[in-house]
């Protein structure tokens, strides 16, 4: 097995479009590293899952760099297994054969779907650069199941190894996966829109190139990895590690909000509720402790709602700075309330007198210094936190901290006054009064509101931070509000789309076994209404010359709906000229644009367009007649020269580099174009295009449909399964999922991984209600692997 995986991986790496020697070298080093340190593979594999997919740069669709990593892990892991004596397997738990049995049933459906998909696409035809309508797409969708078969035995061996801490390694890997996806989102927002811009029509896609034709790859990744980030935070013992993991959770929350995904706002609460419920079932809290824990959770829930409401009012006049000041004050409140419960009335009075004595002078001084309100707030916040955290033996520290807290709350008004040029103060009064009264009321009238524990308080503050982010999301821009208000129309569109998808199932065999893996788009293109057919891109041969055939589709061709052939290029300098050797119907316009662009949305473009001359050869007819043909007219090749209009593209900050993309498209909905050569030359005379004559196939070329997404996906995991794998596939995956959930809430509920696994599956399937998921191999692998691990859970072996 190790040799087979090594050979397959080396062969794939040797054909890497960017650098075959580098790919082969990295593949070999990774396999050797896993062979040397076989326990590290879950961390390495899962942490790199969001990053190792370079299709926009390579043009690889069927194969991607993450496949090489899976094969390297398998080669190294099985090689170590073969060369060294592994611990003898303990008695097999019932979950292992059950997992293998259900996975075998699922694999049977996948293999049937693979055979039917290839046959439906016209038979086997290997090509490194096929898109979604060829037989290679069936292999693309099947490879996630193969990867699970390679990885599951390695997981079972790791779990059986004494002292391997398999659960902790899996948790760390998935938490890092969550953090990697979130960091990519933070970079994307900072580079392309601004971190706090929630008004632009820009939904974050992160590192998931599969979203170039829509889909919820990022949504599903965040939903399925969030429980493990939560588990990592809750089990961390070090204070600094706790702070880092809490920051990771907040990054994830920010990423969730920037997707503007309505289903994620449902999936994550359901996931959190599932995790808490399974934890409670497994922990079996003592009856005396249960009411207190329940009351504390209710208190924090009420506090989150209150902070959200007060923050919404404050945000109008104080903006993001006022919201951050409110959050900082809330952090002090969480730390101070459990300690202040022991104060007597004399200490309360002393704290109040001290605050009234020092506060006015502090605030007047702040108004005399440039940016003084921000400085005054920050210094008082830091000083109060230092008293609480660093001076545990200081006499009277709680009363001193209470005085500092009240001055900090008063500084919220200063921040609002400064940000709003004096007009923001009226919106700050409710927040100041509410926060000032919260301390004595919670400390004296509400028994034991929450524990005096930094970890617990940090988690509560993270929830307050999420509440503030939601406030900013709806208050700081109209885009999310517009998406929520459009939910009913979107639901009706989805229902019609699902009905159309199910209506494409033809015959009893397709109903039970499926139409075939990867065949949804092709069948949709054939059966759709004449004005709704999607476009297509494929390599072809024209008189022995490789060409790229571009069919734009018959749907409405707005700026965001065009099907674009694209390539990442270097940022051009000076004048820019695009030359395209092309043939097609006379009068067809060829559009070219060079944009600063991540995946779907541009941020500054230079563009131009030119039309093909009419073909006047005898027998070709008029341009109008030629445009009715179903395939490119046998016109002469023409070379169009397009001088790109527009000023220089925006410059990037050195720490936020952005990609530049050339895109080509057409406006002819009835007839395709054949592209034989593409050249882009900047003012320095530098050729910016690689593989402009398609001599290396589709290497370096990519495509996107920026806003026209429905034809490319079934947009529901259930509908996707019914169409591509029939009732057999749906039953097999449903059985696996139900078995995994049953194990998590049943016999394995006391195992450390059960709550997070159950929550991940609930989150993933919730996103799957409105997206296919299985047509994105990395997401499919994540879902299937977690499901199989959930079924096969067994107690850890002691060291």
Image (tube, rainbow, N blue to C red):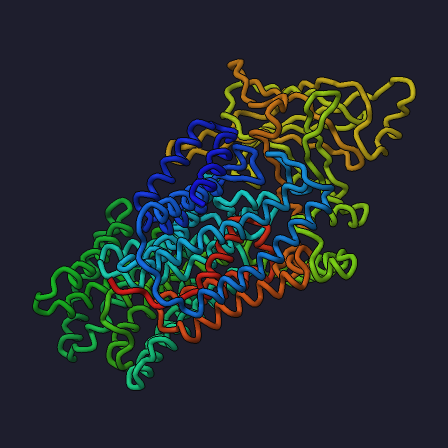
Q: Is residue 642 above or below residue 338?
A: above
**Residue 156 vs residue 525, the one in the foreground:** 156
Q: Is residue 54 above or below residue 609?
A: below
Residue 412 in view of the camera: no
Q: Is residue 11 left or right of residue 356?
A: right
Q: Residue at x 64, y 49 (%)?
A: 114
Q: Which residue is drawn at 77% across and 41% down?
A: 554
Q: Is residue 639 left or right of residue 435?
A: right
**Residue 18's spot in the image, x, y percent?**
49, 28
Disc count in the image? 0
Residue 644 in view of the camera: yes
Identify the image quadrant of the C terminus: bottom left
Report the residue that reaches farthest toward the bottom: 287
Q: Is residue 627 left or right of residue 315?
A: right
Residue 442 quadrant: bottom left
Q: Residue at x 37, y 64 (%)?
A: 464
Residue 717 quadrant: bottom right
**Residue 560's spot in the image, x, y percent?**
65, 41
**Residue 373's spot in the image, x, y percent?**
28, 52
**Residue 738 vs residue 286, the one in the foreground:** 738
**Residue 326 vs residue 453, the one in the foreground:** 453
**Residue 414's spot in the image, x, y percent?**
30, 56
Q: Is residue 605 above or below residue 795?
A: above
Q: In this view, does 33 lie above or below 416?
A: above
Identify the image quadrant of the N terminus: top left
Q: Which residue is drawn at 74% across and 49% down?
A: 523
């Amino acid at each position: 097995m190790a040799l087979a995986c090594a050979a397959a991986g080396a062969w794939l790496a040797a054909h890497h479009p960017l650098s075959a020697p580098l790919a082969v070298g990295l593949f070999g080093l990774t396999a050797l590293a896993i062979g040397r340190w076989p326990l590290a593979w879950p961390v390495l594999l899962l942490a790199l899952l969001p990053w190792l997919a370079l299709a926009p740069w390579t043009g690889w669709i069927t194969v991607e760099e993450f496949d090489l990593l899976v094969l390297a892990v398998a080669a190294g892991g099985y090689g170590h297994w073969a060369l060294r004596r592994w611990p003898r397997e303990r008695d097999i738990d019932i979950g292992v054969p059950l997992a293998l049995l259900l996975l075998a049933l699922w694999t049977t459906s996948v293999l049937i779907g693979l055979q039917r998909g290839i046959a439906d696409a016209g038979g086997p035809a290997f090509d490194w650069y096929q898109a979604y309508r060829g037989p290679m797409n069936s292999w693309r969708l099947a490879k996630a199941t193969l990867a699970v078969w390679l990885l599951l035995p390695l997981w079972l061996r790791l779990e059986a190894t004494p002292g391997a801490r398999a659960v902790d390694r899996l948790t760390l890997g998935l938490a890092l996966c969550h953090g990697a996806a979130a960091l990519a989102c933070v970079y994307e927002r900072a580079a392309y829109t601004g971190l706090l811009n929630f008004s632009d029509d820009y939904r974050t896609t992160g590192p998931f190139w599969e979203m170039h034709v829509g889909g919820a790859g990022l949504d599903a990744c965040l939903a399925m990895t969030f429980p493990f980030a939560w588990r990592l935070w809750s089990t961390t013992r070090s204070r600094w590690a706790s702070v880092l993991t809490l920051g990771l959770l907040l990054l994830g929350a920010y990423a969730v909000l920037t997707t503007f995904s309505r289903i994620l706002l449902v999936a994550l609460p359901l996931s959190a509720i599932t995790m808490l419920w399974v934890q409670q079932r497994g922990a079996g809290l003592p009856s005396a402790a249960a009411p207190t824990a329940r009351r504390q959770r209710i208190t924090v829930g009420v506090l989150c709602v209150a902070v959200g409401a007060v923050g919404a009012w404050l945000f109008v006049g104080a903006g993001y700075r006022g919201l951050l000041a409110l959050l900082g004050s809330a952090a002090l409140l969480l730390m101070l309330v459990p300690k202040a419960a022991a104060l007597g009335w004399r200490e309360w009075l002393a704290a109040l007198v001290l605050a009234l004595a020092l506060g006015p002078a502090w605030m007047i001084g702040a108004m005399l210094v440039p940016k003084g309100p921000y400085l005054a707030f920050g210094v008082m916040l830091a000083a109060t936190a230092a008293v609480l955290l660093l001076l545990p033996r200081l006499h009277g520290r709680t009363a001193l901290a209470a005085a500092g807290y009240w001055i900090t709350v008063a500084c919220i008004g200063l921040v609002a006054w400064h940000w709003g040029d004096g007009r923001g103060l009226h919106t700050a009064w409710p927040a100041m009064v509410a926060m000032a009264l919260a301390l004595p009321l919670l400390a004296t009238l509400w028994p034991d509101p929450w524990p005096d524990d930094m970890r617990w308080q940090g988690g509560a503050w993270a929830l307050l931070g999420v509440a503030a982010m939601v406030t900013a999301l709806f208050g700081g821009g109209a885009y999310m509000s517009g998406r929520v208000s459009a939910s009913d129309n979107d639901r009706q569109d989805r229902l019609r789309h699902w009905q159309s998808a199910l209506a494409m199932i033809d015959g009893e065999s397709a109903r039970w076994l499926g139409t075939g893996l990867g065949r949804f788009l092709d069948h949709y293109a054939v059966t759709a209404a004449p004005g709704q057919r999607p476009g297509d891109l494929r390599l072809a041969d024209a008189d022995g010359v490789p060409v790229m055939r571009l069919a734009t589709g018959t749907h409405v061709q707005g700026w965001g709906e065009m099907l674009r052939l694209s390539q990442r290029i270097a940022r051009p300098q000076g004048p820019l000229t695009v030359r395209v050797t092309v043939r097609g119907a006379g009068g067809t316009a060829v559009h070219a644009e060079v944009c600063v662009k991540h995946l779907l949305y541009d941020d500054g473009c230079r563009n131009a367009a030119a039309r093909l001359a009419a073909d006047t050869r005898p027998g070709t007819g008029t341009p109008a007649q030629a445009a009715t043909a179903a395939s490119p007219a046998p016109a002469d090749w023409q070379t169009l020269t397009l001088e790109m209009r527009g000023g220089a593209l925006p410059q990037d900050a050195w720490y936020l580099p952005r990609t530049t993309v050339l895109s080509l498209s057409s406006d002819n909905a009835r007839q395709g174009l054949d592209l034989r050569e593409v050249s882009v030359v900047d003012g320095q005379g530098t050729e910016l295009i690689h593989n402009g004559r398609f001599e290396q196939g589709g290497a370096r070329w990519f495509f996107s449909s920026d806003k026209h997404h429905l034809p490319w996906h079934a947009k529901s995991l259930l509908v996707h399964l019914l169409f591509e794998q029939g009732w057999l596939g749906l039953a097999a995956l449903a059985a696996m999922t139900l078995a995994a959930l049953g194990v998590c809430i049943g016999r394995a509920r006391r195992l450390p991984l059960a709550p997070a696994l159950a929550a991940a599956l609930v989150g993933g399937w919730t996103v799957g209600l409105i997206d296919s998921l299985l047509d994105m191999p990395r997401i499919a692998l994540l879902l299937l692997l977690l499901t199989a691990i959930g079924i096969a859970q067994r107690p850890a072996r002691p060291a």
